[in-house]
Image: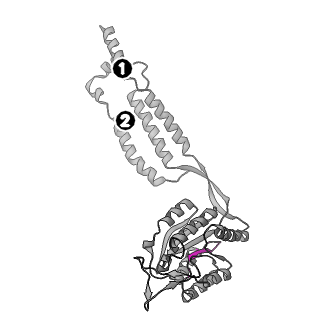
Amino acid sequence: MSFENIPLMLLLLVPFALFAFLVLTNKEGVERVFPKETLDRIKVEGSGLSSRLRNLVIFIAILLMIIAIGHPYILKGEKEVELSGLNSVIALDISASMRTKDRYPNRLEFAKTKIKELLERLVDDEAMILTFSNDIYLVSPMTRDKDTLKEVIDGITIDYLQTSSNFSALANIVSSKLKDRDSKILILVSDGGEKGDLKEFKKVIKKNNIKLYSIIIGTKEGGAILDSKGKAILKDEKIIINKINDELAKISKESGGDYIIAEYGDKDIDRLAKSIDSNLAQYNGKKILKIQNKVELFYYPLIVSILLLLIAFSSIPKREELFRDISERRVDDR
């Protein structure tokens, strides 16, 4: 038998042992005042356990609870568990161009909606969420908890947007995150960036055999890039118009992945989700994980401790009965 929480169990045992020793070896206050013969005469017959025995039962119950907290178990080797689903990194572009309003209410909010729609369809898949611009930020580690991922996505606001997108840094970070994974999938949510920014990105993706699935946010007509105050950014006294970049679509196809230009409705996300799920075929639709085969034992000491507490507390005589019995004994003595 082994224990999973040995440090916690030992931490609780030390003060418990000291307290139990002091209580069990210390006479009660009434025993210091009255001699043993007097106490024997007024002792309540049939009142259940004595105070000292009752304390002992309670301490045994607490000891068993501490043992249960230690989480005892018996290890019976390893067993194989089938896991379906893929491991993917979802990277959201938070560069300044995501303020553009060619998608309602702006590209960033529209992108967040598309990510949440995709998460609803990738039921068995693990996902990690990154945001990228000048720097890369880990928003959520790899998890299957889609509700938490949606809450995290909602927390990304337009206030976080920065100047430009560093695609090459993103590719290197994703490569390290997926290094030991069987499935290497990057789901990129962006308006595409500049062609020059994507050259190094393409090399890293290809070198590390990462399949790229792109959700391209924006329109071919584009829209004005806005600053943090919502005013159009000017260059040479002209409004800068940002259009989607088709280069991201080409890189996605060349990597063995796919892309969509995000539209209103959910048919585009349905198609992309089916394309991502098709990657399960190369893993025969499953993944084998070896885990320890444990037989849990904690509920045995827990159940016994509860029974002992019930016995201890049910043996306490009622106050009215105690005084009535003492009064009756005094009358008999007269």
Q: Residue at x 47, y 82 (%)?
A: 164
- Asked if 72 appears above or below 105 in the picture, the reply is above
Res 34 → quadrant: top left
Instruction: Indicate the secondary structure of the residue bearing disc 2.
Output: helix
**From where the camera sits, is residue 145 visible?**
no
Q: Amino acid at mark 2?
A: Leu
Where is mark 1, residue-wise? Answer: 320
Q: Secondary structure at mark 1?
A: helix
Between 319 and 295, the residue placed more toward the observer is 319
Residue at the disc numbered 2: 24
| The one of 69 and 53 positioned closer to us in this rendering | 69
Q: Is residue 332 above or below residue 130?
A: above
Q: Residue furthest bottom?
A: 236
CA separation, marks 2 and 1? 27 Å
Q: Residue at x 43, y 90 (%)?
A: 237
Disc 1 residue type (three-letter): Glu
Q: Which residues are magenta?
A: 178-192
Closer-to-camera residue (62/163): 163
Predominant secondary structure in magenta?
Answer: loop
Work out whether 11 lies above or below 276: above
Percent position of residue 61, x then y: 46, 38
* Residues marked 2 and 1 touching at CB (< 8 Å): no
Residue 180 is covered by the magenta coloring: yes
Expressed as whole percent of the image width and height from the top left, the position of residue 248 reads 61, 82
Q: Residues within 10 Å of mark 1 (few under 14, many from 20)?
A: few
Number of marks drawn: 2
Dot placed on the residue nearer the N-terminal end, 2 or 1: 2
Q: Is residue 281 magenta?
A: no
| In front: label 2 or label 1 | 1
Above or below for 60 versus 293: above
Return the x and y of residue 232 as percentages of the image width and height.
44, 81
Q: Residue at x 44, y 31 (%)?
A: 312
